Amino acid sequence: MNRVISLTNVRKVIHYHSRMSHTLPRTVQAAVMTGPHQPIVIQEFPMPELPVGGILLKTMMSEVCGTDIHIHHGRLSGVTYPIIPGHVSCGVIAAIRGNQPINDIHDRPFKEGDIVTFLDVAETCYSCYYCSVVKQITRCPHRKVYGVTYSCNNGGLFGGWSQYIQLVPGTKLLRLPDNLDPVSYCGGGCGLNTAIHSVDRADIQLGDNVAVLGVGPVGQSVVAFARLSGAARVLAIDSESDRLEFARQMGATHTFNLRENSHHEENERIKEINKLSDSGYGFDVCIECAGNPTAVRDSLLYARDGGRVVITGQYTDVGSIEINPHQLINKKHIQVRGCWGSDFSHFYRALELQSKYHTQYPWKRMIGKTFQLSEINEAMKAVAERSLVKAAIAPNGTDWF
Amino acid sequence: MNRVISLTNVRKVIHYHSRMSHTLPRTVQAAVMTGPHQPIVIQEFPMPELPVGGILLKTMMSEVCGTDIHIHHGRLSGVTYPIIPGHVSCGVIAAIRGNQPINDIHDRPFKEGDIVTFLDVAETCYSCYYCSVVKQITRCPHRKVYGVTYSCNNGGLFGGWSQYIQLVPGTKLLRLPDNLDPVSYCGGGCGLNTAIHSVDRADIQLGDNVAVLGVGPVGQSVVAFARLSGAARVLAIDSESDRLEFARQMGATHTFNLRENSHHEENERIKEINKLSDSGYGFDVCIECAGNPTAVRDSLLYARDGGRVVITGQYTDVGSIEINPHQLINKKHIQVRGCWGSDFSHFYRALELQSKYHTQYPWKRMIGKTFQLSEINEAMKAVAERSLVKAAIAPNGTDWF
Amino acid sequence: MNRVISLTNVRKVIHYHSRMSHTLPRTVQAAVMTGPHQPIVIQEFPMPELPVGGILLKTMMSEVCGTDIHIHHGRLSGVTYPIIPGHVSCGVIAAIRGNQPINDIHDRPFKEGDIVTFLDVAETCYSCYYCSVVKQITRCPHRKVYGVTYSCNNGGLFGGWSQYIQLVPGTKLLRLPDNLDPVSYCGGGCGLNTAIHSVDRADIQLGDNVAVLGVGPVGQSVVAFARLSGAARVLAIDSESDRLEFARQMGATHTFNLRENSHHEENERIKEINKLSDSGYGFDVCIECAGNPTAVRDSLLYARDGGRVVITGQYTDVGSIEINPHQLINKKHIQVRGCWGSDFSHFYRALELQSKYHTQYPWKRMIGKTFQLSEINEAMKAVAERSLVKAAIAPNGTDWF
Amino acid sequence: MNRVISLTNVRKVIHYHSRMSHTLPRTVQAAVMTGPHQPIVIQEFPMPELPVGGILLKTMMSEVCGTDIHIHHGRLSGVTYPIIPGHVSCGVIAAIRGNQPINDIHDRPFKEGDIVTFLDVAETCYSCYYCSVVKQITRCPHRKVYGVTYSCNNGGLFGGWSQYIQLVPGTKLLRLPDNLDPVSYCGGGCGLNTAIHSVDRADIQLGDNVAVLGVGPVGQSVVAFARLSGAARVLAIDSESDRLEFARQMGATHTFNLRENSHHEENERIKEINKLSDSGYGFDVCIECAGNPTAVRDSLLYARDGGRVVITGQYTDVGSIEINPHQLINKKHIQVRGCWGSDFSHFYRALELQSKYHTQYPWKRMIGKTFQLSEINEAMKAVAERSLVKAAIAPNGTDWF
């Protein structure tokens, strides 16, 4: 399992695929989440008929991440159960419907056999108020997310935990870089796009001190991207020592273990953390990736006056937090920036960066294990229990060559 | 009282002053606030001796504003009782100590007889971490504020409620524009600097919809400056109908009376307010000038997704507020910006703008009445009870010519 | 001619239209520019068949502007002669092809009888490198412009100098506000979008001093928008006194006539112009709308150190200019920003602003005269000779009710 | 020479110094540049008397850089010959005049024996229009530069090519970090401050492609800082292969040798360079550090549409360049930003960064050789002839311990 799959010899795959594409199976196996807290079941779907402009991928690998746990526990709003989960995936183009070429960003057409990945967000309209007037396209009400807000009720294969993935016309694809294997790619996964968006929102200046609150999958990539963006110090804050250790590999210069320091009073803790900044006054930037409301207040406490705080981890509703706006916002002259979703620019840049830096930062190691489709409930259990950070699903096996 | 004082005939004043300057009195009357909740008393001080670079003003007029009430009620931290209050004032230069010229921003020397005003913040160090590294000079720990953090224990006349004001070397002065009378100037007062800083932080784009929460003295100037900055709509929100009416004169295109709409459920109220934006989705910018923590949450509720929220009103500690960071920050992809203090650039620009637009926006009308020094407790009472928005003190009378 | 057309009584138009729409004519009259310097000819086209998603407008009015002169003189690159010119127009929806509703930005469907206008730029792809990675959508290579880069060779009615205009699927429409008559709308015309884009690029701060170099149609709207954006001073610079006079109506606080001051040496002229700024050091912002390369250097000369210069007027190639980068860019610590094209956000905001401020700023007066289709060559001659600033064409007459 | 000087054992130096400070010599040797093209002469000065707040340093090391060559050739305006050159230096505090403590940015007093460096710019006024209104403090007309605009006519030792350096009150000092030796420090030198300012102006985003035109001392540091700021590609462009080779050590991922490619036509060269960007469309950011006007136009040519161009190298007047504003600014929708000088924030951050990264980026190697004071003309000759990139002067020898 989890072995390194070299993609430099792409021709083999294409060859493999060429044989395959003429013999598209009549039925497709996929994992279906029927509702919150229900066991995930493997179902057989008829091979779907594509609309003009649609694309069919033969799945190589798909990510199992914390978002899937949230979905399974009913904590994410807008999920259209039953769904085929798997929002970040890669695969081989098995079919393209229609005569119009479907081009990449450089107007080069995609073709069958290409190994690709795709932005999990589709159907951004580019026409509504949010898309076209105020240019907050991550708030487009027409956006849909593969593996999350596409139901499989009508037989659509709109998630990666399936042998084949069906892409709606207009889905944005990228070729998987030759030097990037599927495990590394899924190791970054959806968190990579969120991380680059967060780091963009943080406006990190060369030499800044950055604190990352919570180093789960998103936080780990934030650590790496903050470091690459010129942060002279990156402090990872978490309660779990193995995460903090891994954060060091991802570029953290300092770590702070909340559990080991839980005997401190709040004031004491703040002082300890402020001391970890170069200036001693607190961090220029705090990026909250923890997913509990307390971390929002803590971010404000750890930032220096005039600093920037990015709120990334609160993408499910985990409740409220009491904040003293005089002490934490007004008098500190602080900036707080919420970060929601990501768009193609994040996806493109994240892939470019991962391709360049994945030998330096071990994204791959975030995938604890690659599972078969039939093992999906074990995979979910492992991620839910945090015995693995993330898992990968290979619905067609990993014996691709 | 409150009569219009034309300054176009400055020579008269200089003449008046010339006679005066040769006869500096031996003693000075000033109003002293000895501590929170204590009656303000008139004391007689010996005329202070200036250090080299020091300046003495003969006071024309000084503002009595909400900050003075906060100070009197002990709600502002850092106040060094006993103090001579009065942070915004104008006067005539009665003496300059030393041979070095003290220049304005264009290297033209100030001289005795000039009618000037001064930035209430002095002793910004330009050398500390906040001043020189991260350039948040409003957070300089060495800053002092006339009328607030200068004690009169040692006889220093560092506030405007005094016949003479003593300026420490380095205090930043501006000539009062010829067309701006002292009442108009005090009508804008300290709120003007705060307002322009808030509006700067808001990055108002041409055509934006702006909601101003709370239209006390700061909020009224925020309304005017937001309008001047290109806001196509400015909604004033308050509980008092006379304030809302005045906000219309200050440029508000719409108003919302919280008291009259108090029968609404919160959701209902938000809907009503969102409807008042051009798009119906909420306001591009919300500027909180209300001074109660609830208004902080409300600002987040009234802003459109991706909007900007400036927190200005929380400059005293009036408690905490519960916020749901998922609903109000993360998912809305919002920006919150605290606004603390102001610096010379705000002071300079505010004065330029007031000089240009004071006939259009009736700042003068914010001064309900001009009082004599001996009437200071009545003045405070009227402002505290809100029977006047602000008051002015004329320690040498208003019969200047 | 040029009479005020009230649109408040929209029902009349709809009624008129309802009768009309059932009797779409078989042929359409349109003005065709066959190539540079050729006389424009009226041709009869068969009524085109719309593709699914296509829209047909019955033209109310279309603009004749300086760009049309440039096109006619062969000075604009990329023009696909023969064309039906007219890039900014308004009309009544006469037909919508297909069952899918075509929605506005608030998801409300357009319907036959609606009086609309449309963004002259279509087919922005939202998928290429420029659209989706670096988000410079005005540089999308797939963009096309009505009246400029759509040929009429195959019978397409893609310009406003035609009784009917054919809109390709995806064209972005806006309803013409009820209070805005077609003449005012065309008076702003394409220059309005360019102007708001330029003013956005200029980042005008409240109280800034702005110089506008060249007050042709774009410059006049820049003057108005700069004023609305908070500029305390707007200096209009031009060689023609009537333009400068009109600029005063559009909000200029000061004017400088280059012809009347042509006896000055360059240094003298710069000094004179710098004196017109509040500070005397030059302008915070210069916006070049003159369209000759000398104005680019002049913009750099008139800006204060650290100022911003927006280059808008160089949208055709009118040659080079010698610049001393030490004196004008490096040592002045200046920012120069090119401004190319506009997108839907500019179009939307410009229309909102025009609707709100057209009674204050007389855009309407930029349309010297409304012509019939058959008079197109006279209209062009008048604009080319500058006897009119702009003209309007009403291909179906103006007797709409 | 040029041996590594460990500063970890600071106590030795202090000890050394303690002995020294009690025996301040009566006279000081210093190198004096009497005018352009004159041989530099060693003169003996009486030990100066300090004003209150003044500081005397015993010089450890001072930089000899390209700016000194410009000064010697009379190409820099504002130089107040005769001068003691040497604008970037470090030394030991030998004396502090007065009882007021002189504090660092954290309010910790400097004391005799401290090994320090200082910002070469002094007397920034913080009060003029540029300092206090528009906050362009590098354009303050009162600024003076050690080694450049302080004359030694009256015996002032205001440059580093002297055994002792006299600092005017208010000069901004920083302690030399323990792990940073004087050679490394001077290797970065003044170019380091300029480089960080340039990179700040460039707003480098994570993953950007950056071209650096000219890799002299400033360009080399720009390469390093661009890389540290998140540039995924850094292309160094120069005519000298050894500079390009060194640029690789400083972090360049790609190089382009103009001399080796001089057979190309301009169009050909642009194409070749654009190909070196990830996208193939040109560079997101170009930073001109070449110091000839042609490089300004080239920067515009190599930038992608919508890109940013920083002009840093034109700090002396080396003539004009013809630019087509339509092709290079307007249509490309480009931003050009001049970069002048630097301030304390750049100095502070540069030193922090150098202290952290000097083992990774070999700034030290830019100092080809350390000279004695008496060898100053050889040092200048070597730098002028480019046989060394930079040199260092150790006026008290390097045998400090």
Image: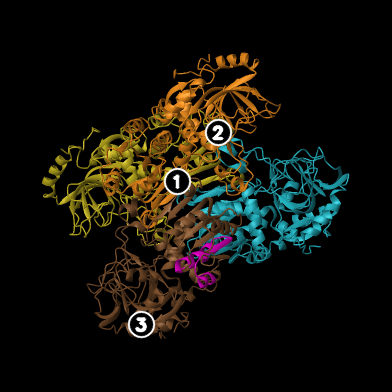
Chain colours: A cyan, B yellow, C orange, D brown
Q: In what element is the residue under mark 2?
A: loop
Question: Is residue C262 found left or right of B299 in the rendered image?
Answer: left
Report the label total: 3
**Host chain of mark 2:** C
Is residue B271 rendered to the left or right of residue C314? right
Labels 1 and 2 within one chain: no
Q: Magenta stretch: residue C80 in it?
A: no
**Mark 3 = which residue?**
D375
Q: Which residues are magenta?
A: D216-245
Q: Amino acid at mark 1?
A: Arg
Please state which of residues A135 and C61 is positioned toward the viewer in this rendering.
C61
In whole angstroms, how far apart are the C-alphas of marks 3 and 2? 70 Å
Q: Residues within 10 Å of mark 3 (few under 14, many from 20)?
A: some
Residue C266: percent from the left, percent from the top? 29, 48
Question: Could you say which disc has been placed on residue B229 in the image?
Answer: none
What's the amino acid at mark 2?
Asp
- Report if the CB atoms under discs 3 and 1 are less than 8 Å apart: no
Residue at horizontal 85 percent and vertical 51 percent from the top = A20
The residue pinned by badge 2 equals C120
Q: Is residue D236 magenta?
A: yes
**Element on which disc 3 rests:** helix
Q: CA distance from mark 1 to mark 2?
A: 34 Å
- Residue B201 is labelled as 1
Q: Chain of mark 1?
A: B
